[in-house]
Image (cartoon, coloured by chain):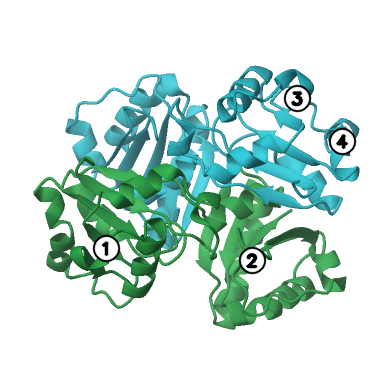
Chain colours: A cyan, B green
Amino acid sequence: MLESGLYLIPNQLSDVPLERVLPAHNIEVVRGIRHFVVESLRSGRRFIKKCDRSIDIDSLTLNELNEHTDLKDTTALEALLEPIGRGEPVGVISDAGCPAVADPGADLVAIAQRKGYKVFPLVGPSSILMSLMASGFNGQSFAFLGYLPVDAHARQARLKEMIRRIEREHQTQIFIEAPYRNNQLIADLATHQPPQLRLCVASDITGENQCIVTRTLGAWKQARYDYHKIPTIFLLYQ
Amino acid sequence: MLESGLYLIPNQLSDVPLERVLPAHNIEVVRGIRHFVVESLRSGRRFIKKCDRSIDIDSLTLNELNEHTDLKDTTALEALLEPIGRGEPVGVISDAGCPAVADPGADLVAIAQRKGYKVFPLVGPSSILMSLMASGFNGQSFAFLGYLPVDAHARQARLKEMIRRIEREHQTQIFIEAPYRNNQLIADLATHQPPQLRLCVASDITGENQCIVTRTLGAWKQARYDYHKIPTIFLLYQ
C-alpha cells in the first residue's frame, strides 16, 4: 500500500524502454495509484500502459491538467486532490519529463503543500539537468529561463541580461526555443553575440539521436547543423 | 560493448536500494566500464560494488577528481580521458547525486566537449530538481545559486537580489547552506525577510526521513523544526 500523498511521476522524453530512464520503483508506484492527473489523456494512458500492460486503465480516474486548465479555479484543482483527503495516493504525469518543471503541475503541488499533504517527487529524465551535466558549464550556479521572448526587443534585452549574469555571476543560462526556430536561433546567436561565448546545444536527450555539443559561438558560426523541429535545449556560458 | 565517451553516472543521495532511484540501464553502463573518475575512492568503490557485487574492483582504474584536484592542470585532466582516445568508455561518479551539477566534474566534461568526445548524462536523483518539483514553486524559471555567502554583508546583498528576482522575474531561487547552520538560516529568513514569501525546505531527499515542506516565512516563524546537520536544500518564492 502506498502512503497517501501527491506523487510526481516523470515520463520518458523519447520513446525508449522505460528501464533505460526510470527506476523500477516508479513502476511500482504507478501500479499502486488509482487516481491520476495527466497533462493529456492520450499520453497519460500510453505511459501507464507502458509501465504495466495488465493495468485496467478503465478502472482508473484520469483528469487532465494542462495549458487549457483554469488555474484560478482552485476549487477544481482542490477536487483533483480529494482522494488524498480520503487517505489515497494521487499521481501526476507529464507528457514528457518531470511534472511541475517547465511543465504544468506546480499549481497543484502548491495546493497540496498548503493543505499539508505529503508530496513525493520521483526520479526521472530532465532535459534541463541532463544537458547541464553534459555541457561542461558551471553546475554550481545556473538558471533555467524557459522560452526566449519572441518579440525582437524583449529578446535582445533578455540575451543582454543573460550575458551579464554569465560574466558577473558565472551563472550558466539555460533556455528553450520553439523547435521550428532552433536553427535560426543558433545562427542569430553566432552572428550577434560575443564569439568567445560557449553554446551547448542538446537535442533528442535520451533518444536514439541524442546529440549534446558544446562549441564557442565562433565555432558554431562555421559549423554545419540541423536541429529543425528536433526537441532541443540551449545553454550559454563563458 | 558500450560506445566510447564520457558517461556521467549519478549516485544515490541516501542509502536506499538502487532500483528505487536509478534506472536499470545505469547498472548495465557501470558493468561495461573499466575506467572511472570518482569524487572519492571510498564512495566510488562502494557504489560500484552496490551496482554489482561480482565486479572485480581491483581490475578497474579509479582516479579521484574533487576539491583537492588542481583544475588548472589540464594535462592531468586530459590524462583521465585518455581511454576515450583509445575507443573505451570512461565513467564519472559523484559521492552523491549528479556529476557536474553542484559537484566536481564540469571541468572534465568541458575538456571532453573540447576534444569532440561524446558525453552521455544518465538519469538519477538530483536534490535540486526533486525539491523544485515538490515545492509548488515556478518551474518555468528558476535558479540554483549554490551556497549562500558566509559573510553577513555579502549574504544580505545576495538575499536582496534573490528577492528582487522573485518579485520582478518570478524566478524560483534555490540554494544550500552548511548543514550545521540549517536551523539558523530558517530562523534568520523568518525573522528578517518578508513574511508572505514562501520557503520550501527539502531534507533527506529520497531517504527514509524525506520531508519537503513549503510554508510562508510567517508560518516558518511559528513552526517547530529541526534540520540540524541533515542534508537540506532551500527554495524561496513569492
Q: Are marks 2 and 4 on the same chain?
A: no
Q: For the image shown, how many numbered marks are present on the structure?
A: 4
Q: Nearer the viewer, mark 4 or mark 3?
A: 3
Q: Amino acid at mark 4?
A: Thr
Residue on which the image places disc 4: A74
For numbered disc 2, what is the local secondary structure? helix
Residue A95: x and y in percent read 59, 27
Q: CA distance from mark 1 to mark 3?
A: 45 Å
Looking at marks 2 and 1 on the same chain, the residue that comes earlier in the sequence is marked by: 1
Residue B197 appears in the figure: no
Disc 4 to disc 3: CB gap under 8 Å: no
Q: Residue at x 19, y 64 (%)?
A: B59
Q: Are marks 2 and 1 on the same chain?
A: yes
Foreground residue among B51 and B105: B51
Foreground residue among B103 and A201: B103
Residue on which the image places disc 3: A62
- Is residue B152 found left or right of A135 in the rendered image? right
Residue on which the image places disc 2: B160
What is the chain identity of the residue bearing mark 2? B
Residue A149: x and y in percent read 52, 32
Residue A233: x and y in percent read 42, 35
Using the rendered view, name the quadrant where residue A85 is placed.
Answer: top right
Residue on which the image places disc 1: B37
What is the chain identity of the residue bearing mark 1? B
For numbered disc 4, what is the local secondary structure? helix
Q: Nearer the viewer, mark 2 or mark 3?
A: 3
Q: CA distance from mark 2 to mark 3?
A: 42 Å
Q: Nearer the viewer, mark 1 or mark 4?
A: 1
Foreground residue among A169 and A76: A76
Q: CA distance from mark 2 to mark 4?
A: 31 Å
Q: Amino acid at mark 1?
A: Val
What is the chain identity of the residue bearing mark 4? A
